[in-house]
Amino acid sequence: MYTRSPRPLVPGGPSGPGDDGSRINPGPGGAKNLRAGPNPRQTTTAMNMDPDYLNIITYNVRTLMKDERLIEIENALKEVNWDIVGLSEVRRIGEETTERDNCIFYHYGTTSGLYGVGFLVSKKWKNNIIEFIGYSDRIAVLKFQISQKHTLTLIQTYAPTSSHTDDEVESYYDLLNKACDDHRGTWTMVLGDFNAKLGKRQELDNADTLGPHGLGCRNERGTRLLQFAFGQSLKVSNSFFYKKAQRRWTWVSPDSITKNEIDFILSSNQSIIKDISVINKFKCSSDHRPLRARVSFDIKIHRKLLFTKQIKRLNKHTLIQNADQFNLELSNSFKCLEIDIEDVDNQFNNIKKSIYDASKKVKQNRINDNKLTTETIALINERESYARCSPEYNQIDKIVKRSIRKDIRSYNTKLVQIAIEKHHSLRNAKMGANRSKTWINCLKDENGVKHSHRDNITTICTTFYKNLYSDANKNELPDIEYTCPDTIPPITGQEVYTALKNYSKAFDSITHNSIFTALQNQDIDPTYILILKKIYNNSTADIKLQNPGPIFNIEKGVKQGDPLSPKLFTATLEEIFRKLAASWERKGIDVGGRMLTNLRFADDIVLFAPSASVLTQMLQDLSTASLEVGLKMNRSKTQVMTNSVKSRVEVDGQEIGYVDEYIYLGQIASFENRQDKEVERRITNAWKSFWSMKDLMKGTLPLTLKRQLIDMCILPVLTYGAQTWSLTEHQKSKLKVCQRAMERTILGVRRIDRIRNTTLRSSTRITDVGAQTAKLKWAWAGHVCRMHPDRWARIVTEHCIGDTPSFLLMLKKTEEFMKLDGPKFAFTFIADITHDRTMLSVADSDTAAWLRRLRDGGHLEDTLVVVHADHGPR
């Protein structure tokens, strides 16, 4: 038989290990391949790999606590073949699965800033993921679908270091044994940083567990690892492949002298492992080298197809930039268009297809989604030219990290800048480089059992929504503009009991039968009702997470996101209150001679009553009537408030709790210091919004764009609800102080710089918060004046508290703003309240005299009284 002779060592080859087996002299580098070119070999990306193989990597990243580190490793993976990466020392707290641009990232950690494990899975295998399970911040499990009947279980681990006690090590291996026993698949692989040295196989070692190849000498932790592998019938796959000494070590000491093999891949079936090797030039800073296994199975890996959008969105900006080409293509398409007068739908589809085909022919600019600049990539390449852990390497590594951080901020700033200029979504732009979709890690079923299997999660979601949208009392359906109030009235001077009523799953619980009955009773055209019946009777849905669930019928609720849904809901709610109108005729509170019983905005309802007993009866009546249409009151979120004695209020025998204030339609409702509380809340929320964009406000974004951000995102938060405010001088000052502090922040100046406010404003030119509140108030005043007299917003505004109309009290504080806005705005406002639009073009002498009197120190109340007297509504 022919026996292959061993190949002799090449000149300059590596010397053998030292006495302790851990130190290596790499020599001058071995023989050189003279045919090799100066450029590095280009590798194939994971997306183009042979689907019969999996490249599985384990890597101790040292930390992924910051997003720039995650982007760094993603950039490094672009140059290597990989499908799954097991990560050690992630150092992120909590359990989370996020879908990023090119991968699925899972991490699990319980100790802040320490330990932690996780996985990176190439996005092409997204639908082969069965489940992620986190056992501890040292052990995590990934179950992977190979075929319909075969699964691969990957257990990523990070073992305790030598500084930990033996008890901690034993607890770790006990939990690792449990993870292996609980999730054993067709094939099982345990991989990670074991902080153990195995060395070469010894005489008493099991040859099936440990192969003949190794590095260095075994230590005590290596013996414990070997016992674990033998107990679980696992093979230490590293040891079955011959590699040169400098191609075996996975960890290097800080002094770059000691190098050990402490990262291993263990497999239940050695035949599936075709090769294991370290990746030498991996462009990510760590004292470990990635260890990669090339895995092949006897069967073809079944790759589930990803969902693709049926309708691709067109980039309108590209079409605008290439308008000539688009018009030419569109003209050519229309020339070939066949006119079909008889079939309108077919003609519409042909026209739509012609426009779509023409737009596809317009060449779109390729978007560069690389978050790192060429300068940063050059620094990364330069870093790889130095020995790891050397002083030069550490120095340039710090520069690389700062450069990556700078690139990410520039990338995020660019996204926001584009969003502002092109009026795109600022919410998505502010997410910047961190844009990702979060997966549901686990759910509890109706019995309280926790499930992390993707199919089980889909089943639980489907069951929940199927039960939610099923109508247990579904009856035969019958044959066949509501406007919400605007504000909570500032009622004082009488005892008031208010209840903020909240429904559970209001829009999802309302029955279809009640919707059509309400529309029919409110004289809606039967044709419209018939169309809605056909739409809602055939409604189905399925739950789509990573995989679609089974289809089920929707038997109740209105369609979420449909512009018609709020109208259908409010029409049904109106039907409920019409039935209660007769019994509530003498209930409620007196406002301008009329009884106000409730205010409604969608499912946010406030009830008013003069006593606790009356409020109890009203709540019980409303709860009973609501159940008839499928609406159930959420008692935990229903609250009662009063300016009188807190007597017991209950519904169905359950007591409703009292509060001193609550939030209704985004504003504080309270009987005491409401205005002060609301102004403080507005300022707090404005600062939260401001600091959520800290990198933009304190970064290099042009001042013009910062001004737009403040006017678009911060000012609306600061002035929300200002239409109903009656600000004191102190409250105005607090709002202005808040805005000035933000101006100093975006300009990079401090109070001690002693720069005048006028100078700051001339630089920023942002909209003044005082002028904005006045503008909103005057706009609201004109809106109220144009309202129908029966609208509650107008009735409440014109209601007299004592001898003074509340409308005049609301406007009393705005004289200075009217003077600042000038006669033109005053004429517009007077025209609004008198319903005489001719004042906008020609002002008669009387009106001019009124304005002169106001400008010369007259009172706004007197002026408006004259206006009401001489120019009443026509």
Image (cartoon, rainbow, N blue to C red):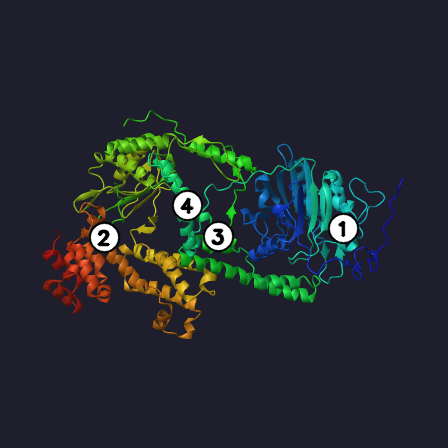
Q: Amino acid at mark 2?
A: His
Label placed on residue 363: 3
Q: Residue furthest top?
A: 476
Q: Which residue is mark 4?
A: 333
Residue 635 visible in the shown view: no
In-front residue for pair 616/458? 458
Q: Which residue is mark 2?
A: 783
Cα separation between marks 4 and 3:
17 Å
The disc, 2 or 1, on the residue closer to the chain's N-terminal end is: 1
Q: Which residue is mark 1?
A: 197
In-front residue for pair 582/399? 399
Cα separation between marks 1 and 4:
70 Å
Q: Amino acid at mark 4?
A: Ser
The disc, 4 or 3, on the residue closer to the chain's N-terminal end is: 4
Q: Amino acid at mark 3?
A: Lys
Image position, residue 654 (x, y; %): 36, 36
Residue at 11% x, 56% y: name it: 871
Circle 4 SS class:
helix
The disc, 1 or 3, on the residue closer to the chain's N-terminal end is: 1
Q: Residues within 10 Å of mark 3 (few under 14, many from 20)?
A: few
Q: Is residue 174 above or below residue 757?
A: above
